[in-house]
Image: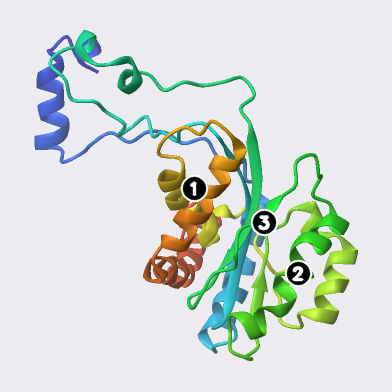
Amino acid sequence: MALELNISRRAIQKVVKRDLGMRSFKRKKVQFLSGSVKEKRVSRSKSLLALHAIGVLENTIFSDEKIFTIEEATNSQNNRVISTSVSAIPDKFRYISRMKKPLSVMVWAGVSAVGRTPLIFIPPGVKINAKTYQELVLEPVVKGLSQTMFSGQQFVFQQDGAPAHTANTTQDWLKHNIPNFIHKDEWPPYSPDLNPMDYSVWYILENKACSVSHNTVNSLKISLCREWEKMPQETLRAAVEGFPNRLRAVISKKGGYIE
């Protein structure tokens, strides 16, 4: 803008910030949402909000999978070093190393307002399909949550639209073992902005557990487990309790992304 108007950069910054009360924001890459997908996000958000209003979703556990690497997590926006000059910064602070194919591990977890599941590490080389999802996650962890997390009360199980989750065998397993679950046709499509695991919990865990790089996957796992246990339940509760407001935001944005 300064070049186009032939005025100084400092002058245009003052106009934008002081006179117009505006500031710059980074553009964000997101999944393309077609008109039909936006309509489904709105209609399903309305349905879930109605269920929440009558208390049906009170004991909901939100779940998700994420791949963590041994590399240091970084945010280019605020990862800064204060120094008298660039050359005075030691290399270990100036640079963040990256590899073409860093070692990694896939993790499954779930959270509710009253608790959390253990972290489930998917064995290396194992592809998450309906069969392995049921054997590694649903049977050993989710099936017993009524007793382990909710003191014998019923709960609602949430999962996203991943193929292993929406497979007919998985949906049938849930019908027989977890009567109260959000059906594949009830959860809004392409909606990481509605899952507390995606919009809050994973980010916090990664920032803590991956604040430094790890030499081995085992070291990464130990760090993940340690920080998972240390995460305050109040933090998880706040993330979960933000869910209904996010449903309202999706409705207000007519199905568009809200962050």
Label 1 neighbour load within 10 Å: few <14, some 14-19, many 20+ = some
* Secondary structure type for disc 2: loop
Residue 192 image point, x, y percent? 57, 53
CB atoms of marks 3 and 2 within 8 Å: no
Q: Nearer the N terminus, badge 3 or badge 2? A: 2
* Secondary structure type for disc 1: helix
109 left or right, relative to 19:
right
Q: Nearer the viewer, mark 3 or mark 2?
A: 2
Foreground pick, 118 / 165:
118
Residue 223: image tag: 1
Residue 140: image tag: 2
Q: Quadrant of residue 18?
A: top left
Residue at left offset 23%, top offset 36%: 23
Residue at left offset 88%, top offset 58%: 131
Q: How is the image coloured?
A: rainbow
Q: Marks 3/2: CA distance?
A: 27 Å
- The amino acid marked with disc number 3 is Pro
- The amino acid marked with disc number 2 is Pro
CB atoms of marks 1 and 2 within 8 Å: no
Residue 95 image point, x, y percent? 37, 18
Residue position marked by numbered label 3 in the rendering:
189
Q: How many marks?
A: 3
- The amino acid marked with disc number 1 is Ser
135 left or right, relative to 191:
right
Foreground pick, 16 / 226:
226
